[in-house]
Amino acid sequence: MRSPSEIKRVIEGRLRSYLSRDRTGIRREVLILFVKTKSITIAEIVAELQKRFTVTFHAIASMVGIIASRIGILRATRNTDGVNSYELKEKYVDTVISIVGAV
């Protein structure tokens, strides 16, 4: 069984690897949105990113899915309308801030 500090190092490594493949800056912006907001939906992320980037709903949904499942730093909740909202797990906020430099 891994210790909490070892898990945090693994998550940090996954996050750095994920961001190293970010050619456009969209991945970094998605993570900054998670730091800045308590809870956000895919549609809200798309609306915010479309101000600066050319993105599609499907592409952003895919990014958020990877961040939630492979990296493991997001919590998903479904509201009564069936819409998922995502939030950054509290124990990873500091890690994400240190990597993306957002405040």
Image (tube, grey):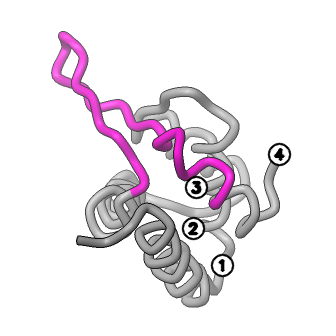
* Residues at discs 1 and 3 in contact (Cβ within 8 Å): no
* 98 to the left or right of 61: right
| Mark 4 or mark 1, earlier in chain | 1
As measured in the structure, the alpha-carbon distance from the residue carrying label 2 to the one carrying label 3 is 5 Å
Q: Which mark is drawn over residue 24?
A: 1
* Residues at discs 2 and 3 in contact (Cβ within 8 Å): yes
Which SS class for mark 3? helix
As measured in the structure, the alpha-carbon distance from the residue carrying label 4 to the one carrying label 2 is 16 Å
| Mark 1 or mark 3, earlier in chain | 1
Q: Which mark is drawn over residue 27?
A: 2
The boundaries of the magenta stretch are 73-95
| Mark 3 or mark 4, earlier in chain | 3
Q: Quadrant of the N terminus?
A: bottom left
Relative to 44, residue 1 above or below: below
- Indicate the amino acid at tag 1: Thr
- Nearer the observer, disc 3 or disc 4? 4
- Indicate the amino acid at tag 3: Val
The residue to which callout 4 is attached is 103
* Residues at discs 1 and 2 in contact (Cβ within 8 Å): yes
As measured in the structure, the alpha-carbon distance from the residue carrying label 1 to the one carrying label 3 is 12 Å
Q: Residues within 10 Å of mark 1 (few under 14, many from 20)?
A: few
* Residues at discs 4 and 2 in contact (Cβ within 8 Å): no
The residue positioned 22% from the left and 25% from the top of the image is 78
The residue to which callout 3 is attached is 30
